[in-house]
Image (tube, grey):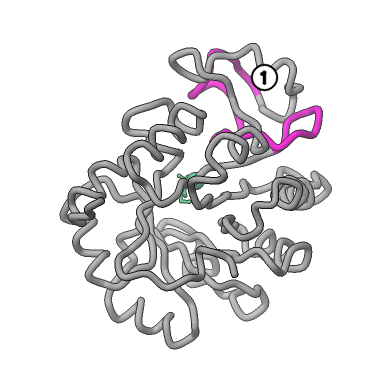
């Protein structure tokens, strides 16, 4: 059984891009710190670089989070290794994240929208998860329902979530493709979460994980709505707000 699907008495606490409030986002330092802060899991973003490896970085380009520039897809892994992703951290591969914290944390792998339908990103990500024996601890998510559908076909044993937010076109915001996309979780942006909405989705056997929660009042509110997981930049703060002990 995949651990995301187990029942729990409080929302899971998931570090968004690791403990990204306190360490450079999507780096091994941020993922280790999330574990030290008592997170149940982490969220991270993956894409494929020029040499084909699955690497962990949020943007399509290197400019915001590293001292490199241009598209990630135009750099080989060897070249990406030379870059500083903050405080001397490197851009990690998904393999390295699994090796570092895969035994300790649940991992929400957000698959970035592949730049072309032939990028092979979905198959490459599934291969890395299976090779690391992480199928019981990974949850996939993506803003593109067609990518979620492809993941369902490639790896039906790994649960999936559809991501969306209020600023998207109505067909994505209201998840019009949902009937054609086998999935177990919805990942709405937190302002979309209400008690009625969580119950409505619950009647469809869908659980709700929500993001990005960095404000105590918002965390308390979505927890009261019955979400399964709260994704935010500071696991330490989320634990304090939810009064998690131990
Ligand atoms: O997966 C939740 C959240 O990370 C989605 O948005 O842009 O931060 O990847 P983004
Ligand atoms: Mg993300």
| Quadrant of residue 141 within the rendered picture | bottom right
Query: How far across and how far down the image is residue 16, in percent?
Result: 41, 44
Q: Is residue 240 left or right of residue 187?
A: left
Of residue 58 and residue 16, the one placed in the foreground of this image is 16
Q: Is residue 198 magenta?
A: no
Q: Is residue 227 left or right of residue 237?
A: right
Query: How far across and how far down the image is residue 17, in percent?
Result: 46, 39
Q: What residue is pinned by disc 1?
A: 80
Q: Is residue 99 left or right of residue 121?
A: left
Residue at 35%, 82% in the rendered image: 199
Of residue 178 and residue 123, the one placed in the foreground of this image is 123
Residue at 65%, 75% in the rendered image: 182
Of residue 51 and residue 180, the one placed in the foreground of this image is 51
Residue at 59%, 70% in the rendered image: 1
Farthest residue to the front: give it: 246
Query: How far across and how far down the image is residue 104, in percent?
Result: 49, 45
Q: Where are the magenta residues, as a range?
A: 48-70
């Amino acid at each position: 059984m995949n651990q995301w699907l187990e029942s729990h008495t409080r929302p899971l606490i998931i570090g968004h891009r690791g403990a990204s409030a306190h360490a450079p986002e999507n780096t091994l330092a941020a993922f280790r710190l999330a574990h030290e802060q008592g997170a149940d899991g982490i969220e991270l973003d993956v894409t494929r670089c020029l040499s084909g490896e699955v690497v962990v970085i949020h943007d399509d380009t290197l400019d915001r989070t590293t001292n490199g520039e241009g598209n990630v897809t135009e750099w080989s892994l060897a070249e990406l290794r030379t870059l500083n992703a903050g405080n001397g951290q490197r851009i990690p591969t998904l393999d390295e994240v699994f090796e570092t914290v895969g035994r300790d944390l649940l991992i929400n792998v957000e698959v970035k929208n592949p730049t072309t339908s032939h990028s092979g990103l979905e198959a490459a990500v599934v291969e890395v998860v299976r090779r690391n024996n992480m199928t019981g601890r990974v949850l996939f998510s993506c803003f593109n329902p067609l990518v979620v559908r492809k993941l369902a076909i490639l790896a039906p044993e790994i649960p999936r979530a559809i991501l969306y937010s209020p600023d998207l076109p109505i067909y994505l915001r209201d998840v019009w493709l949902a009937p054609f996309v086998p999935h177990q979780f919805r990942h709405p942006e937190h302002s979309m979460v209400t008690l009625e909405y969580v119950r409505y989705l619950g009647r469809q056997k869908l659980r709700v994980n929500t993001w990005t929660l960095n404000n105590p009042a918002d965390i308390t509110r979505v927890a009261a709505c019955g979400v399964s997981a709260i994704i935010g930049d500071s696991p330490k703060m989320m634990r304090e707000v939810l009064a998690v002990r131990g």
